[in-house]
Image: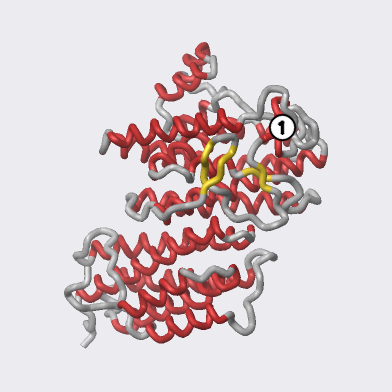
Amino acid sequence: MSIRLNVKQRANTVGTLRFLSVFLMETLARWIPMTPEMEVKMLLSRQVWRMAQQADRLGRRANELRAPLHYNRTPRHAFLAAFKQLAAVTDTIDRIDAFHDVALPALATAYKSYLAETDQLTDEPTVMICNQALGEIETMRRERNEWGSEIPKPRTPDSDALKAVRQAVAAANNDVVDQSEQVA
Amino acid sequence: MDPFETKVVRGMTMRKDPAREPCFAVADTDDQMISWPDWTDESKRERIHRHMNNEISTAEVAAQCLCDFPDAPWELRMELARQVWDESRHAMGLYRRLKELGGHKGEFPVANFEWAVSSYLDSVIGRITVMNRTFEAGTMDLMAFIPDGWRAHGDPETAELLDAIAADEIQHVRFANHWVHKLCAENKRNLIKVAQAVGFMDAAQKAIAPPPGSTNLVGVSVEDVSQSAPINVADRQLADFTDDEIAVLLKKHDLESLVNRQEAGVRQ
């Protein structure tokens, strides 16, 4: 059977991916004024716009799936808690890597998981959005190491805070979308 | 909106500065800055350095709006997110040029006045009124002339960079105009927020203005290096200021006689 996700389930996932994109956009935006290093501010600023565009495309697609325009759906509790932990890191290198090396791979996993589940023909508009997002995620991850000459290198080994964030996100990463009825 | 730290400058309470690297000396007022009226190599680097920090500060204002006002209309948030990216590209372009001219970050003091005033306001309409529709529109006026100044002093490269930046700024002013009008039309109480924001900005500008005769850190009269320019009618029209709004600005700047030229679309 080709149709594995119904329209409602697709909208639920699209809304969740949008929630995460907006969450990351806001996290980056919050970090920009409080991060001292100029080039890091500018790197984070680039990614704000990319996350906004992903959220925008998902929000419009949600409306095509019988959900409200720019529908946001809260992810499962453990995943949301892990992302909140990620948003709370304070060190500059931790912030750079929490976003580029933890959040973005987790988001990519969620996109890939959706692509593996949905029907590539009837849900092709979402498939295109997911593929575009995956390309942008690759670009952002590449920029972490290649954009700007003054971006600090990753810390080896991770700080305790970043290690804890990695573990929390990894533990929750297999179950992101809540398909139950009661979630707003 | 989360609580934030404040600072008091000459009796005026404003938002505390955003984070800067230790290499930057952060000033509060023009008499704590360095600038020269002439066009020596050092003066050129200072102009670029100051502009670079202003772009960073504007990116920070727009970014702070994104996290302080999660319930703002999504289309407005998209404009702000785009602005964050634009201003970061501007800052990096200016930083690149600064280094090409032998300068470095932290070479001169910087000030974050626009952040301190705009981000103190508690409404998104107040912030875009002050940051985009006033400060950025003022920069738009200056930018009608500044690139030619660089060309006249033998630096077409910087002139082109500034002109590219100026083109982007038009959209930042335009979207603010669009949203201020739209939000006021939807809710008349927003007019009060706009008036309060403008009143706060005027009070802050008066408070931090150095007394007549003040000099900056290199002994130059602050009045000699203060920047002002006639209203850039052409770009203000592109940024969707109405003819009435432009006429009011021209009158405010004692340029009433130009109103008819403006109405004819003549670039001042």
Name, please, the residue furthest toward the left: A181
Residue at 41 percent of width and 73 percent of height: A83
Q: Is residue A160 left or right of residue B199?
A: right
User: Is residue A106 something that shows in the picture?
Assistant: yes
When asked about the image quadrant of residue A72, the answer is: bottom left
Label 1 neighbourhood size at 10 Å, few (<14), some (14-19), many (20+)?
some
Q: Can residue B161 be seen in this view?
A: no
Q: Which residue is at the far top?
A: B257
Residue depicted at 31% across the width and 77% down the height:
A77
Answer left or right for A165 relative to B162.
Answer: left
Q: In which quarter of the image is residue B7?
A: top right
Residue wearing tag 1: B149
Q: Which colour scheme is used?
A: secondary structure
State whether residue A155 is above or below residue B16: below
Please determine whether, in this image, residue A119 is positioned above or below residue B162: below
Residue B107 lies, with reference to residue B216, above or below; the image says below
Q: Which of B195 and A64 is in front in this view?
A: B195
- Tell which of B147 and B103 is nearer to you: B103
Q: Where is residue B158 in the image (x, y as percent from the top left)?
A: 71, 43
> What amino acid type is highlighted by mark number 1?
Gly
Residue A9 appears at what percent x and percent y? Answer: 22, 76
Which element is circle 1 on? helix
Count how many numbered circles sit on residues in the image. 1
- Give above or below for B135 relative to A170: above
Picture coordinates of residue B265, whole percent (x, y) = 48, 23
Residue lying at the far front of the rendered structure: B11
Q: Residue at x 51, y 51 (%)?
A: B5
Residue occupying image coordinates x 25% and y 58%: A69
**Label 1 marks which chain's residue?**
B
Q: Measuring from the top left, give residue B152's x and y in whole percent.
A: 75, 32
Image quarter in which the C terminus of chain A is found: bottom left
